[in-house]
Image (tube, rainbow, N blue to C red):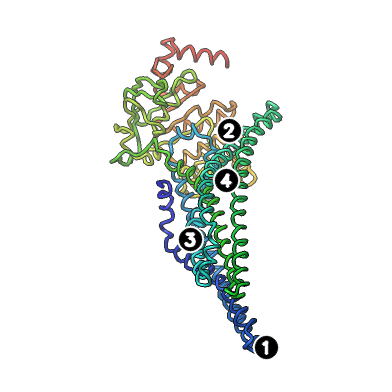
Amino acid sequence: MSHWKSYFRFVKPYTKWIIVTLLIGILKFGIPSLLPLVLKYVVDDVVLNHGLSTGQQVQHLLIVLGITLFLFVIVRGPVEYMRQYFAQYITARILYDLRNKLYEHLQRLSLRYYQNTKVGEIISRFINDAEQTKNIVEVGMMNVWLDLFTLIFVLGFMFYLDPVLTLVSIAIMPLYALSVKVLYKRLKKLTKDRSAALAGIQAYLHERIQGISVIRSFALENYDRKQFGGTNGAFLEKGLAQSRWNAWTFAIINTLTDIAPLLVIGYGGYQVIQGHLTLGTFVAFFGYLDRLYAPLKRLINSSTVLTQASASWERVNELLKEPYDMVDEPGSGMLKADSCSVAFKQVWFKYHEDGEWVLKDISLNVNPGETIAFVGMSGGGKSSLVGLIPRFYDIQEGSVQVNGRDVREYTMQSLRSHVGMVLQDNFLFSGSVKDNILLGNPGAGEEEVMAAAKAANAHEFILKLPQGYDTEVGERGVKLSGGQKQRIAIARVFLKDPPILILDEATSALDLESEHLIQQSLRDLSTNRTTLVVAHRLSTITHADRIYVLKDGEVVESGSHEALMAENGVYAGLYSIQKLQA
């Protein structure tokens, strides 16, 4: 029941609305329940009342019709509208709150979580499973209670008409209870398996759409269709298993439902023949029988829906309970500085507790305004090292410091607001060029955006785009070249104006012309900032105050470009090879 309690925190703010909706629903379902009584009155007291003349019978009939028309047309119409609207309003608001909470939760999860979880799986829980949970309120907290009220209301009238016949009509209800207990336990597991299989399809589809260029370039269309057929087939198998169980459930429930009218017809007809029951009472009773088993059927259907909703909520709740690897430490302070120093003190780091050390005993200092560079073979730990400064990961031993304090002593938001990053593959969001630059400072004005673009050597090419700064860049910036995307990313950092700048192989994937423009922008960007550069092309970092050579997670050499060349060690060898290749 604990996972239900966690859902009710989303329901609690709307408790009053739910109560109002239930009261309106009682009126909505209560009015039709009067119809069999009206029928009894018409049959026994009007049609079969031979003490009344024909004119009096017609007069009584018209009075009854007038009253019922008022109830069913004038009263019930607005009541039906309000009940439906309020029910949809409440569920929509709860779903809105739930998705907001989910999104906030996703933003706080660590990069490690996203590296280990498929995006399609997350989207499936966020969209499909969250959507299913609305039935917990709409069905479980509204429809079920209204159907139970209808059952009690109808049973009250039935006992009033004939207690013995009522007992006959509900004789099969224990079988209903047994069926629900046996059938729906299995249905919940099958529903959860189907949801997991659907998430598998979404994860596969998301990944393949992202990599469609690879599939095309290797002519893998036929192979990929077969792979998708396997994933789709797994979903089909789970879906059919759920459908088979659903079919058995409805077959058994409907069979049980059909037995009750036969019992009433048999016993009630016999009572009318014997003169122990009036024809009007028998007709009214049969009318109530339908109103008894209609909500009962809905309750059974509600059990199916709630079983599916419960399975979906369990999947959503699993996501909500995903722990945060990275949290602000108690008593964390705000980082407020126009310039920053960075230091690594005997830092040891690995991504997983049972994994190998990625960084080993790293110690170095970067003074405010200095530029240092990290070079070395791929896998040496360069990107891992600079990723520790904005606290994308926490280290196991040692200390990463900004302005002499451990980064864990600052709030993550204030720490990261002081760090600007330009990566090899910068992510652009769908939207306009202006929207993407504004991510550096959402409150900036148009002139500031243009100034940042000019500083990044991006203003000129932006003006040549079809709508200039309002040009849509497409998903991940697909409508722009690599150099254009990179310059927009640099403009973003110019607009942010952070005291710490991290350049992680920011030009390694570009052509020489684009690299020349961007290197000029990066030189301007790093002026008067504490700059850490991860470089593949060593010719781009010869100006650095110090260069650190990393190999297998350790610093093997350090010094200026001239000093390292004079040592004729690892750095000199790498530089000579690249110069020869050039």
Q: Please tell me which of labels 1 and 2 falls first in the chain.
A: 1
Quarter of the view holding residue 187: top right
Quarter of the view holding residue 240: top right
Image coordinates for residue 183, horizontal then vertical, percent: 54, 46
Using a 10 Å C-alpha cutoff, classify the residue at mark 4 as few (fewer than 14 neighbours), some (14 to 19) or many (20 or more). some
Find the distance from the CA under tag 4 to the CA under tag 1.
Answer: 77 Å
Q: Please tell me which of labels 2 and 3 falls first in the chain.
A: 3
Query: Mark 3 = which residue?
Result: 145
- Residue depth check, mark 1 versus mark 2: number of the one nearer the observer: 1
Q: Please tell me which of labels 1 and 3 falls first in the chain.
A: 1
Q: Amino acid at mark 4?
A: Gly
Query: Mark 1 = which residue?
Result: 54
Find the distance from the CA under tag 2 to the CA under tag 4.
Answer: 18 Å
Quarter of the view holding residue 297: bottom right
Q: Is residue 403 above or below residue 10?
A: above
Query: Mark 2 = which residue?
Result: 483
- Residue depth check, mark 1 versus mark 3: number of the one nearer the observer: 1
Query: Mark 4 = which residue?
Result: 431
- Residue depth check, mark 2 versus mark 4: number of the one nearer the observer: 4
Residue found 47% across the figure and 38% down from its top? 493
Q: Is residue 436 above or below residue 79?
A: above
Question: Extreme front residue here?
Answer: 274
Residue found 44% across the figure and 43% down from its top? 320
Using a 10 Å C-alpha cutoff, classify the residue at mark 2 as few (fewer than 14 neighbours), some (14 to 19) or many (20 or more). some
- The quarter of the rendered structure image containing the C terminus is top right
Image coordinates for residue 165, horizontal then vertical, percent: 54, 66
Q: Amino acid at mark 3?
A: Trp
Using a 10 Å C-alpha cutoff, classify the residue at mark 1 as few (fewer than 14 neighbours), some (14 to 19) or many (20 or more). few
- Residue depth check, mark 4 versus mark 1: number of the one nearer the observer: 1
Find the distance from the CA under tag 2 to the CA under tag 3.
Answer: 62 Å
Q: Amino acid at mark 2?
A: Gly
